Image (cartoon, rainbow, N blue to C red):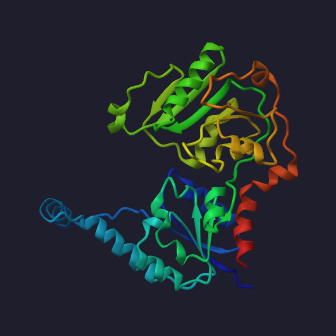
Amino acid sequence: MTKPKLLFISPNYYGFNEVVLEGFINYSGCEVQHIVSNEKYIYENFGEKAGNFFAKIFLGKNLKSEKAVKKLTSTINALEQFDYIVINRHDLLTKDQMLILKSKTKNLLSLLWDSLEKIPQLENNIDLFNKVYSFDGVDAEQHGFVKINNFYFIKKAVNNLNTFKVSYLGTYDKRIKQVIKFFTFFKEQEISSKAKIYIYHSELYKVKEVLPATVQFIHDIIPFSEAYKFYEDSKIILDLAHENQRGLSFRPYEAIGLKKKLITNNSEIMKYDFYDPQNIFVVDTGKEINIPVEFFESDYKEVEQSIADKYYIKNWVAKIIQDNE
């Protein structure tokens, strides 16, 4: 029996695409093909590189970007028909590219891992899709998207040999004030903790804050497929939602898979079936942080298996396929 065909198009962004691609390969039952939508164009020779340099200076054109678009369009044009085409960050594609893709499938699907408020350009060409999947419940309700939760992809046994009580992994943005607030609290309460914040070398000049000693800047991205390892020696994961974020990020689901407790400022989590105050402490960051010592000392409480399984990547993939069979 011939397998159905699935095409997954996404940017290479923190390695998210690699994890999702592996999920489609392992659990979709499809023959899977992948296209990286933000692949950089490589100059064929020095003359081409020099030509682009002068075009940017004298014509205001980036020939390298234009060639990258042409190359991707050529790749899309050469594709055969697919049963499913799934696109993450469709705003990185041109309308012409989107129309070609629509002609090659009966199921053109979009995955949104950001809200429309955060990336407004995601509204571009949204009407071309048969279905749009979003982790943001408000966007789903207002725009008729299909609500889909994020997932975990690593399963681990409870680790009782925890070196740290709390760990946090993030990027340098407006949340840095909350990071400082939390890690100052941890220091004052003598709670062992660690944090790594990713920032470009070139953006260090923007840093005006004095960081606690337990918070470290890093300049190399830790891929999503490897990030879970940072939490393995900690009892609790700290999750700080972006401003105006409504859905849950990947951190709460990673906590389920790794069997870790969670501290979060996203009160939305209290609506979910895996919420348990023994495992999850919700902080109102508009107030002083006051987390009782009992939360740090009490054991992790196993999530009911049937509930935990719902959020595993296998079932995330199954939902997308079954919705469109």
Looking at this view, is 174 or 84 the one in front?
A: 174
Residue 279, given in percent of the width and then of the height, sits at 79, 34
Q: Can residue 110 be seen in this view?
A: yes
Q: Residue at x 68, y 23 (%)?
A: 163
For this orientation, the residue located farthest to the left is 58
Residue 324, given in percent of the width and then of the height, sits at 70, 77
Q: Quadrant of residue 162?
A: top right
Residue 237, given in percent of the width and then of the height, sits at 67, 34
Above or below, 3 relative to 166: below
Q: Is residue 36 visible?
A: no
- Left or right of 94? Residue 63 is left
How many marks on residues? 0
Above or below, 204 relative to 5: above
Q: In which quarter of the image is residue 259?
A: top right
Q: Which residue is drawn at 46% across and 31% down?
A: 217
- Left or right of 65? Residue 246 is right
Above or below, 62 relative to 281: below
